[in-house]
Image (cartoon, rainbow, N blue to C red):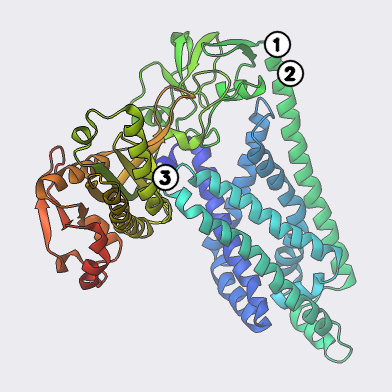
């Protein structure tokens, strides 16, 4: 989690203020969604949320966060050296700039109307007031813009965590569903409350209970809204003038940067090296979006390092976390003022960067090692064609048991293989590995029956199944690096497979696989194995035939 809080104080303030605003918007959308049930529940939830927000602390926190977030956004725009940026960042900036223009009328007709004109901005008042008006469409757009801006920000902040990729499908479902339900809640109550507010018999009393504004009050609110929009427009214009002025002045003092694996470029003093790269159209990886957290934009300064400013504490901490050499810097934090020669750490060819996933990620899942017994002795004296033909027939017979449960063969090891079960969650991964082991054993028996008809010796195998932390990534030279897995779990699974030969069994399944699959290993007769290269003893279930797994596991069905 520490990686989430790297960066300077402005970055941290932007994250904290954004989290406060995102939390408020989240509960506000839930509040509006309750309109699907009743106006009473909708307004009751509003009162609960208001009880927190209307306290002195709540108002300072909410409005302080809003001003901080907006101010830092404008400052960041003004201080940019280039407007060239990734699409997701462009989208977030555009949505963020739209928010004040869309929000102003809502803020004035609720908050200002309440404090200056004694209006009670309950949900019934708001829904009835704007239903079937241009303001209603504007507020619907505001809902989507605010939520979209916040979701992009949350994704960019959290995507450096290894666990985020596993949570992303669920989070995307929630992010899509919540605004839809909120809009449905507004539509459900908007029509009803409009009719109630302007009912010839009861409308006057209802409007009075809300302190419904008069025509003169509406005119004053419109003037306040207009003043607010002009104020924000002026601040935005000021930020644009600062940006253009700095760009003009900087263009007169360009800095030369030579990439060892790429072109020579020129950038304005004060720009970060990442901004210089993007402006010049040089691909440069930045997984966290240039916020100094992920270190994927780091470079090695081959020449000119002594002329660069020293790294800030936050940059130094990020570099120390990855054991970077002394001449390594983060391109998103480095602002060259003198010529330098640099090498992009995660770009070796100057044309195509490796995908983010190739940089390595940790996953906890099950793997399966399999080896054919006495293969060398069996194939001695055979023609190469016969050897390859036997192996292909063998793999054709057993591999469908792996792929059929969602597993994949990570690599073939001559007369064996390594299979990985990269499913959603370690429980599903473990169950798939168990099903694959049982399926392989059954398929092998059918295969051996065919060999018997051909007067050939049957094939014996050893299987090791284990579950634990794995590192997945592309390992090797750029563009020639296959995706593979490494880690202590791989070594332990390999040792389990090797131990099957000494024990005279077909398979060894570790207790970690059984537990993850929902079985209680204490109800099974497990062997304690001291495996070479594995720090702790491994408890494993030994099986004469892996096809017996379903029957054996019936006695250990109690979940742990």
Q: Are marks 2 and 1 in contact (CB under 8 Å)?
A: yes
Q: x and y percent of residue 106 in the render?
A: 75, 62
Q: Quarter holding the C terminus?
A: bottom left
Q: CA distance from mark 3 to mark 1?
A: 43 Å
Question: Label 1: which residue?
Answer: 252
Question: Label 2: which residue?
Answer: 248
Give SS at disc 1. Answer: loop
Q: x and y percent of residue 76 in the render?
A: 63, 35
Residue 127: tell me if it is visible.
Answer: yes
Around disc 2, counting alpha carbons within 10 Å, would you say few (fewer than 14), some (14 to 19), or many (20 or more)? few
Question: Label 3: which residue?
Answer: 162
Q: CA distance from mark 2 to mark 1?
A: 7 Å
> Which residue shows up at 33% across the image and 27% down it?
384
**Front-most of 87 and 332?**
87
Decide if residue 145 is on the left or right side of residue 447.
right
Q: x and y percent of residue 63 in the render?
A: 61, 55
Q: Quadrant of residue 181?
A: bottom right
> Which residue shows up at 63% across the image and 49% down it?
67
> Which residue shows up at 47% across the image and 48% down it?
165
Which comes before the other along the chain, label 3 or label 1? 3
């Amino acid at each position: 989690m520490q990686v989430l809080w790297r960066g300077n104080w402005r970055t941290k303030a932007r994250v904290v203020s954004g989290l406060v605003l995102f939390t408020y918007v989240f509960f506000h959308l839930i509040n509006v969604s309750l309109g699907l049930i009743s106006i009473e529940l909708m307004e009751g939830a509003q009162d609960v949320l208001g009880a927190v927000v209307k306290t002195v602390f709540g108002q300072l926190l909410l409005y302080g966060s809003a001003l901080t977030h907006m101010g830092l956004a404008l400052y960041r725009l003004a201080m940019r050296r280039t407007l060239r940026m990734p699409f997701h960042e462009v989208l977030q900036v555009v949505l963020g700039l739209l928010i004040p223009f869309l929000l102003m009328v809502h803020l004035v007709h609720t908050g200002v109307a309440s404090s200056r004109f004694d209006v009670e901005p309950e949900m019934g008042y708001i829904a009835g007031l704007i239903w079937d008006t241009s303001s209603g469409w504007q507020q619907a757009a505001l809902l989507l813009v605010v939520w979209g801006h916040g979701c992009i920000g949350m994704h960019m902040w959290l995507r450096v965590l290894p666990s985020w990729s596993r949570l992303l499908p669920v989070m995307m479902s929630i992010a899509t569903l919540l605004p839809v339900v909120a809009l449905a809640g507004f539509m459900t109550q908007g029509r009803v409350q409009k009719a109630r507010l302007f009912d010839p018999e009861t409308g006057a009393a209802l409007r009075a209970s809300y302190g419904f504004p008069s025509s003169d009050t509406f005119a004053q609110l419109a003037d306040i809204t207009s003043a607010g929009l002009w104020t924000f427009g002026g601040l935005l214009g000021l930020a644009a003038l600062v940006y253009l002025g700095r760009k003009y002045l900087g263009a007169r003092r360009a800095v030369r940067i030579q990439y060892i694996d790429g072109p020579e470029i020129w950038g304005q003093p004060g720009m970060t090296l990442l901004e210089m790269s993007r402006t010049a159209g040089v691909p440069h990886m930045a997984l966290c979006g240039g916020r100094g957290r992920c270190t994927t934009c780091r470079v090695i300064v081959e020449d000119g390092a002594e002329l660069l400013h020293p790294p800030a504490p936050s940059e130094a901490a990020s570099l120390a976390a990855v054991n970077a050499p002394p001449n390594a810097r983060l391109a998103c934090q480095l602002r060259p003022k003198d010529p330098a020669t640099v090498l992009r750490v995660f770009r070796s060819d100057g044309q195509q960067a490796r995908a983010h996933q190739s940089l390595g990620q940790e996953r906890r899942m099950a793997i399966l090692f399999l080896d054919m017994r006495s293969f060398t002795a069996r194939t001695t004296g055979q023609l190469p064609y016969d050897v390859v033909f036997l192996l292909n027939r063998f793999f054709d017979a057993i591999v469908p048991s792996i792929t059929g449960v969602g597993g994949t063969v990570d690599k073939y090891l001559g007369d064996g293989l390594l299979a990985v079960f990269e499913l959603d969650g370690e429980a599903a991964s473990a169950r798939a590995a168990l099903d694959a082991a049982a399926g392989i054993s059954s398929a092998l028996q059918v295969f051996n029956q065919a060999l018997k008809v051909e007067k050939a010796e049957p094939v014996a195998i050893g299987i090791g199944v284990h579950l634990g932390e794995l590192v997945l990534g592309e390992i090797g030279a750029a563009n020639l690096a296959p995706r593979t897995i490494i880690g202590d779990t791989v070594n332990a699974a390999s040792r389990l497979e090797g131990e099957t030969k000494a024990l005279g069994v077909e398979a060894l399944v570790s207790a970690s696989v059984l537990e993850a699959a929902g079985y209680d290993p204490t109800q099974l007769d497990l062997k304690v194995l001291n495996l070479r290269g594995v720090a702790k003893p491994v408890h494993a279930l030994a099986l004469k035939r892996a096809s017996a797994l379903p029957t054996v596991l019936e006695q250990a069905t109690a979940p742990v």
